[in-house]
């Protein structure tokens, strides 16, 4: 029986295999944040001569990439990228996701938006029938923390400030339990429209295009239904 760590290592290796055909001397790859993304970075480093560099969704991932000798690009210097690889906290069969457990959700959404495809890497425990057991992370401008929390309560949520945590953007995170997520893309738009919300951790309007899921039997590939 493979441990969760071994499953993450397997899917990280599978993700490197997935991105190999996209590599080239002019290619910048998009790299996400989290323990699975860390393993992807470590596996990617073996091929660092085969691509130009990476754009990272957090200071943490940027530091890890740089430590491996991979050049890190400011996203403003990047015209486009073929692929963005990142983990998720929950994913459904439509490849809608909840992300932001590591607090990097806004930069993750930004870097992903520049990439032609989003490849989600996770172990199979992240695949759920319905999103929402994992409290939804929402990045907020600090002065709007209370007003946003009240609006989320009206939506049925139970927001909790992620204590002592400041995002790479100098903002705060509300982790919101209890939301009933019937139509993920609608809820994403509704929450993102609350004044003071930087972004919410629902990735449904633009979810993943491909998911690589590590199981005890091997790595499964799922595609977003068209
Ligand atoms: O969204 C994220 C960070 O903001 C991560 O992708 C998510 O939390 C999954 O992390 P891990 O790979 O450690 O389970």
Image (cartoon, helix red, strand yellow):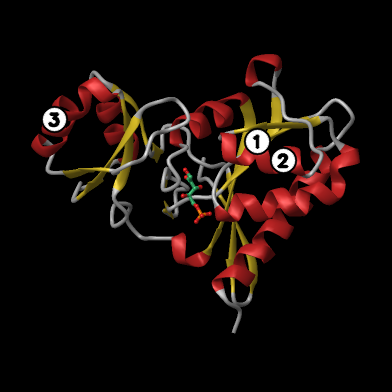
- Element under label 1? helix
State which mark lies toward you, 1 or 3. 1
Q: Is residue 194 visible?
A: no
- Element under label 3? helix
Label 2 to label 3: alpha-carbon separation: 38 Å
Residue at image location 33% in from the left, 41% down from the top: 164
Query: At which x and y percent is residue 67?
Result: 75, 42
How many marks are shown on the rendered structure?
3
Label 1 to label 3: alpha-carbon separation: 34 Å
Residue 187 placement, left or right of 62: left
Q: Label 1: how many residues lie within 10 Å, few (<14), some (14-19) or many (20+)?
A: many
Residue 217 placement, left or right of 197: right
- Element under label 2? helix
- Disc 2 C-beta below 8 A from ligand 1: no
Reading the chain from its start, which is encountered first: label 1 or label 3? 1
User: From this viewpoint, which residue is outermost toward the bottom?
Assistant: 1
Query: At which x and y percent is residue 90?
Result: 41, 54
Label 2 to label 1: alpha-carbon separation: 5 Å
| Label of residue 62 in the image | 1
> Is label 2 in contact with label 1 (beta carbons under 8 Å)?
yes
Query: At which x and y percent is residue 95?
Result: 47, 48
Residue 137 placement, left or right of 123: left
User: Residue tagged by mark 3?
Assistant: 151
Residue 216, picture quadrant: bottom right
Q: Label 2: how many residues lie within 10 Å, few (<14), some (14-19) or many (20+)?
A: many
Residue 146, picture quadrant: top left
Q: Name the residue nearer the viewer: 2 or 182.
A: 2
The quadrant the N terminus occupies is: bottom right
User: Residue tagged by mark 2?
Assistant: 65
């Amino acid at each position: 029986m493979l441990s969760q760590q071994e499953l993450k290592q397997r899917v990280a290796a599978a993700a490197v295999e997935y991105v190999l055909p996209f590599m080239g001397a002019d290619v910048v790859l998009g790299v996400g944040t989290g323990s699975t993304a860390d393993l992807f970075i470590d596996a990617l480093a073996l091929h660092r001569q085969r691509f130009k560099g990476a754009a990272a969704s957090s200071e943490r991932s940027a530091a890890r990439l740089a430590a491996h000798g991979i050049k890190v690009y400011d996203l403003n210097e990047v015209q486009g990228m073929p692929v963005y690889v990142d983990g998720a906290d929950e994913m459904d069969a439509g490849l809608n996701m909840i992300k932001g457990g590591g607090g990097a959700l806004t930069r993750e959404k930004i870097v992903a938006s520049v990439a032609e495809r989003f490849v989600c890497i996770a172990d199979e425990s992240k695949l759920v029938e319905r999103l929402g057991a994992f409290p939804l992370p929402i990045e907020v401008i600090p002065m709007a923390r209370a007003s946003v929390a009240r609006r989320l309560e009206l939506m049925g949520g139970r927001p909790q400030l992620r204590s002592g945590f400041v995002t790479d953007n100098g903002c705060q995170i509300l982790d919101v339990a209890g939301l009933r997520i019937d139509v993920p893309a609608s809820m994403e738009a509704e929450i993102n429209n609350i004044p003071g919300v930087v972004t919410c951790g629902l990735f449904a309007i633009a979810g993943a295009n491909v998911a690589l899921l590590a199981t005890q039997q091997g790595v499964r590939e799922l595609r977003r239904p068209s």
